[in-house]
Image (cartoon, rainbow, N blue to C red):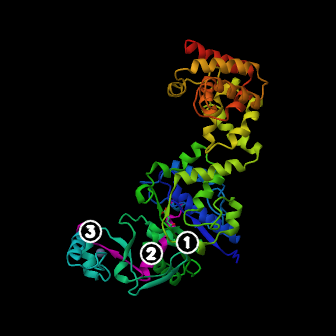
């Protein structure tokens, strides 16, 4: 059932390059909002000046735009809860921290790192829970004065309730966290800087987020956030309700290890550079924890939006499979209408990708060959090498291809083929018949007979269907290239 009150958020920290795990989270939030006719809030969690960068912020916005994941509130769009960059909301967080302290939901903790370490070790050795032990929960005036004389600078710590916290995860069902497992936690650094643990739930409360959909790695912070929500409701921050949580499954990479940001295959830029279609990439990423139906892997973004709901997300880890991702992209390339395909290839037919001189590009030849390329590309960047034989003065020199195709007897075969090709009508069918006939004279099947022709004309052993390629290249250039190959073979 549609629920237009849905408010979800995508709230990355601007560190490093966008990666596929992040995109999956953005996609699921976006699809959930669009499915319900609700609102997607895009918030930038840039409270860690040491790690955040403006460049990464720009990349995030650029990625979202390229993917077509539009947001209803956030950077450049604005909205009723602006600003949407946490670095611009610091005063607000400090104010909330002060209120939490005043209401007793938080307290100053004077423990030094050494003291915390020592007690943690002791607890571990004794087999007790090793989280914060509550030492500063009740600090008397005298101790406080002493700590301050000692020059200790306190952090602010949130006081967890002493009872278990239970919630129903939208993906995983009912979960319970007992107090031993969720110790009091820091919310403001000694230098006064508010931490993620505070600002993330505070903003979710203020921005009236109804559903928090995010990666499973954040599951352990959920009981803390729920406790904080309840405290915020008590002190009148936000609208008093707690969002529902749904934790998206881990994405596993090679060797059944979690896909990490550092894995080269997780970088979104790589997919853009290789020429993935946004539809293809999003289709694949949607399968990381969700499916449209058991027998349909390929679908449009609109179809996904129409069907997507968070309850259907699977809790089991998903495996990132680059081969499948590529196969799905290839399918989306085939589905483009021919004009859209030709258009989509344009960047790879120009500098800096094109290895031919700009003025050599021939629009008519491109339009003639494009349909043959469309059914064969996995990624758009492959187009350059597949059509360069049309626009280069000479085919590329690829030694490996040459050695592989030019065997003993290739010169004789090429000579026969040249003669037959020269007499053929200039269309793919007749050209094929010519090469078949040449092969027969030398006792070669078509596959073997066409290899030297292909390398002579295109420079490569693999490429688009050969006879259609010759048809587009034209008689003179085809024969000229075969002659050049014969010369090189010393024939
Ligand atoms: N900024 C947090 C992160 O990137 C957001 C976590 C969340 O969605 O709550 O990990
Ligand atoms: Zn303490």
Q: Taking 405 as reference, is 33 left or right?
A: right
Can residue 82 be seen here? no
- Residue highlighted by disc 1: 212
| The residue at label 1 has a CB less than 8 Å from ligand 1 | yes
> Residue 333, how many percent across, how many down?
68, 48
Disc 3 crowd, CA 10 A, few/some/many (<14, 14-19, 20+): few
State which mark lies toward you, 1 or 2.
1
Q: CA distance from mark 1 to mark 3?
A: 34 Å
110 vs 459: above or below: below
Q: Is residue 190 visible?
A: yes
- Label 3 and label 2: CA atoms lie apart by 22 Å
- Spot occupied by residue 273 in the image (x, y as percentages of width and height): 57, 43
Find the distance from the CA under tag 1 to the CA under tag 2.
26 Å
Question: Which of label 3 and label 2 is nearer to you?
Answer: 3
**Is 113 covered by the magenta stretch?**
yes
197 and 417: which is toward the camera: 417
Query: Mark 1 or mark 3: which comes first in sequence?
Result: 3
Q: What mark, if any, has residue 112 been given in the picture?
A: 3
Above or below: residue 63 compared with residue 210: above
Q: Position of residue 110 (x, y in %)?
A: 29, 72
SS at badge 1: strand
Disc 3: residue Cβ within 8 A of ligand 2's nearest atom = no
- Which is nearer the N-term, disc 3 or disc 2? 2
Q: Quadrant of the N terminus?
A: bottom right
- Residue at the spot 49% in from the left edge and 74% down from the top edge: 96
Magenta stretch bounds: 87-114
Residue 396 belongs to the span the image colors magenta: no
Q: Which residue, as the protein is rendered here, is positioned at the far bottom?
A: 163
Q: Quadrant of the C terminus?
A: top right
Q: Which mark is residue 98?
A: 2
**Secondary structure under the numbered disc 2 in the rendered image:** helix
């Amino acid at each position: 059932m549609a629920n237009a009150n849905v408010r979800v958020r995508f709230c990355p920290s601007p560190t490093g390059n966008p990666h596929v795990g992040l995109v999956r989270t953005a996609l699921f939030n976006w699809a959930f909002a669009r499915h319900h006719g609700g609102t997607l809030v895009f918030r930038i969690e840039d409270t860690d000046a040491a790690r955040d960068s403006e460049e990464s912020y720009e990349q995030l916005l650029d990625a979202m735009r390229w993917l077509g994941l539009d947001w209803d509130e956030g950077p450049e769009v604005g909205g009723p809860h602006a600003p949407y960059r946490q670095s611009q909301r610091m005063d607000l967080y400090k104010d909330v921290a002060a209120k939490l302290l005043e209401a007793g939901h938080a307290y100053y903790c004077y423990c030094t790192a050494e003291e915390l370490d020592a007690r943690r070790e002791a607890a571990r050795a004794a087999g007790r829970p090793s989280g914060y032990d509550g030492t500063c929960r009740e600090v008397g005036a005298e101790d406080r004065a002493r700590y301050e004389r000692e020059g200790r600078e306190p952090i602010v710590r949130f006081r967890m309730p002493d009872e278990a916290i239970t919630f129903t995860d939208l993906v995983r069902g009912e979960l319970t966290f007992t107090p031993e497992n969720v110790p009091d936690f820091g919310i403001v650094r000694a230098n006064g800087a508010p931490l993620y643990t505070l600002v993330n739930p505070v903003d979710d409360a203020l921005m009236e987020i109804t559903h928090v959909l995010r990666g499973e790695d954040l599951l352990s912070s959920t009981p803390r956030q729920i406790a904080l929500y309840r405290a915020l409701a008590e002190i009148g921050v936000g609208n008093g309700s707690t969002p529902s949580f749904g934790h998206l499954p881990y994405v596993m990479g090679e060797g059944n290890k979690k896909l990490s940001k550092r894995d080269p295959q997780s970088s979104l830029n790589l997919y853009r550079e290789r020429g993935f279609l946004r539809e293809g990439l999003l289709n694949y990423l949607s399968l990381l924890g969700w499916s449209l139906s058991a027998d349909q892997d390929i679908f449009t973004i609109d179809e996904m939006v129409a069907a997507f709901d968070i309850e259907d997300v699977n809790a089991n880890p998903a495996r990132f499979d680059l081969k499948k991702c590529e196969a799905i992209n290839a399918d989306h390339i085939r589905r483009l209408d021919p004009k859209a395909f030709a258009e989509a290839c344009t960047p790879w037919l120009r500098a800096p990708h094109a290895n031919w001189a700009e003025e050599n590009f021939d629009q008519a030849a491109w339009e003639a060959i494009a349909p043959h390329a469309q059914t064969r590309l996995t990624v758009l960047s492959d187009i350059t090498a597949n059509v360069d034989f049309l626009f280069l003065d000479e085919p590329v020199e690829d030694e490996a291809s040459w050695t592989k195709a030019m065997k003993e007897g290739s010169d004789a075969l090429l000579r026969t083929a040249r003669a037959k090709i020269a007499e053929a009508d200039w269309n793919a069918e007749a050209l094929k018949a010519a090469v078949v006939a040449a092969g027969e004279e030398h006792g070669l099947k078509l596959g073997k007979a066409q290899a030297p022709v292909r390398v002579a004309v295109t420079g490569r052993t693999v490429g688009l269907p050969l006879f259609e390629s010759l048809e587009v290249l034209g008689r003179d250039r085809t024969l000229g290239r075969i002659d050049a190959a014969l010369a090189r073979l010393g024939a």
